[in-house]
Image: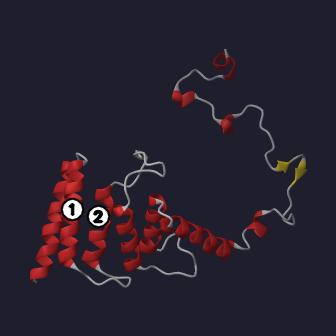
């Protein structure tokens, strides 16, 4: 057995990984020749067009979102929401993020073939709660709207209840009350 000769007893704490290889191999070679920094395919030359590539990549993501891909809509919304993974020629824009979150929420839970897509990673309640949070705080070009925020938190709570997330639903109901309380001030 391999475990007897390799010193691997089978216990997780004693398992050998790639770094524990008794016969280390030199991974710095590519097809028998050492990579130098002057190579055309070295990391230095690959990073030259990073901004151009980010812009191109974001534009493709935006095209996919406009074509109806729900996951792309969420990624575009997050980019406008947080500013992360946003192309360099764009800036954080909460009204645009809100638009894409809404579009993703209105998109059905079916894939291109009309079948239910159980692999959707973003539950409805999470998207609704993020929209509500953005409207509660305002910023990045978005006006505060505590009334709408409270309504969205209530929708998020109802969606969380449907997903059997009772504690989370209670938190959303509390946040809805807090949002509506800001209207009275």
Instruction: Rate crowding at label 1 as few (under 14), some (14 to 19) or many (20 or more) other CA atoms within 10 Å.
Output: many
Q: In what element is the residue under mark 1?
A: helix
> What residue do we see at 66% from left, 71% from top?
53
The location of residue 71, given as percent across then percent down, is 46, 58
Q: Is residue 85 left or right of residue 54?
A: left
> What residue do we see at 55% from left, 69% from top?
63
The location of residue 46, given as percent across then percent down, is 75, 67
Tag 2 near tag 1, CB within 8 Å: yes
> What residue do we see at 49% from left, 81% from top?
91
Q: Which mark is residue 128?
A: 2
| Outermost residue to the right | 33
> What residue do we see at 45% from left, 79% from top?
92
Name the residue that disc number 1 marks: 155
Of residues 133 and 15, the one drawn nearer to the viewer in this rendering: 133
Distance from Cα at disc 2 to Cα at disc 1: 7 Å
Quadrant occupied by the C terminus = bottom left
| Outermost residue to the top | 1
Q: Quadrant of residue 1?
A: top right
Number of numbered discs overlaid on the protein picture: 2
Q: Is residue 151 left or right of residue 2?
A: left
Of residues 96 and 117, the one drawn nearer to the viewer in this rendering: 117
Q: Quadrant of residue 40?
A: bottom right
């Amino acid at each position: 057995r391999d475990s007897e000769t390799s010193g691997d007893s089978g216990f997780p704490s004693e398992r050998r990984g790639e770094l524990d290889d008794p016969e280390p191999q030199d991974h710095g070679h590519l097809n028998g020749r050492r990579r130098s920094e002057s190579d055309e395919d070295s990391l230095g030359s690959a990073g030259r067009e990073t901004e151009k590539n980010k812009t191109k990549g974001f534009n493709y993501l935006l095209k996919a979102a406009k074509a109806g891909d729900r996951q792309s809509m969420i990624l575009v919304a997050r980019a406008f929401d947080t500013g992360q993974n946003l192309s360099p020629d764009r800036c954080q824009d909460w009204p645009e993020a809100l638009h894409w979150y809404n579009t993703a929420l209105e998109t059905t839970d079916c894939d291109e073939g009309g079948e239910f897509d159980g692999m959707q990673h973003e539950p409805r309640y999470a998207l609704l709660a993020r929209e509500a949070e953005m409207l509660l705080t305002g910023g990045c070009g978005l006006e505060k709207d505590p009334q709408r925020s409270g309504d969205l938190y209530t929708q998020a709570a109802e969606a969380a209840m449907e997903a059997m997330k009772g504690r989370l639903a209670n938190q959303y109901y509390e946040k809805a009350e807090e949002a509506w309380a800001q209207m009275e001030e």
